Image (spheres, helix red, strand yellow):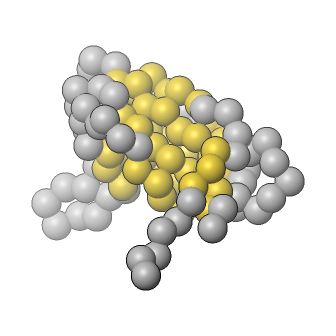
Amino acid sequence: MSNTSVIRTAGQTFALSVTNSAHASVTINDTTNDQINFASFLNTGASPVAIKVTNYSPAPAAVFPTDGTPGDFVLSPLMTTPIVLAVPTSPFYMTAISNSATASIIYVTPTNDQS
């Protein structure tokens, strides 16, 4: 028997317009009384976007990894399906940055494992 997780939305979707200057810290909160530890992320822009997720505000600026130096999680460009990542219990705080001056829109939705 396979192990399948059922993911449901647990709050409103937030949109961030991200360029190569760091996006200000944003509070992502759910709309349920459950403990939420996941969020879905979708990057519809043509450039990769680095995101930093923390449990304190304000979240520090997200940075791209460089040769020999670690950075934050990078969302691929032109995503057609969101990726679900573990996050601190909501509310959580995040920042993002793109490697392009052209705006990328990323969508963030608090989600919950229902299974």
Instruction: List x then y, in percent, for residue 67.
Output: 13, 60
**Left or right relative to 95: residue 99:** left
Q: Which of the image's four quarters has the N terminus?
A: bottom left
Quarter of the image holding residue 48? Answer: top left
Q: Residue at x 45, y 22 (%)?
A: 17
Instruction: List x then y, in percent, for residue 43.
Output: 36, 34
Q: Residue at x 40, y 50 (%)?
A: 83
Between 12 and 66, the residue placed more toward the observer is 12
Q: Which of the image's four quarters has the C terminus?
A: bottom right
**Left or right relative to 102: residue 86:** right
Between 100 and 3, the residue placed more toward the observer is 3
Indicate whether 26 appears above or below 21: below
Q: Residue at x 24, y 36 (%)?
A: 77
Indicate whether 2 appears above or below 54: below
| Residue at far front of view | 1
Between 63 and 102, the residue placed more toward the observer is 102
**Left or right relative to 45: residue 6:** right
Indicate whether 47 appears above or below 50: above
| Residue at far right of view | 33
Quarter of the image holding residue 19? Answer: top left
Whether residue 75 is visible, yes or no, is yes
Whether residue 37 is visible, yes or no, is no
Quarter of the image holding residue 87? Answer: bottom right
Q: How many marks?
A: 0
**Left or right relative to 31: residue 18:** left
Instruction: List x then y, in percent, for residue 51.
Output: 42, 46
| Residue at far bottom of view | 1
Between 5 and 38, the residue placed more toward the observer is 5
| Residue at far top of view | 102
Instruction: List x then y, in percent, for residue 108.
Output: 53, 39
Q: Residue at x 30, y 26 (%)?
A: 45
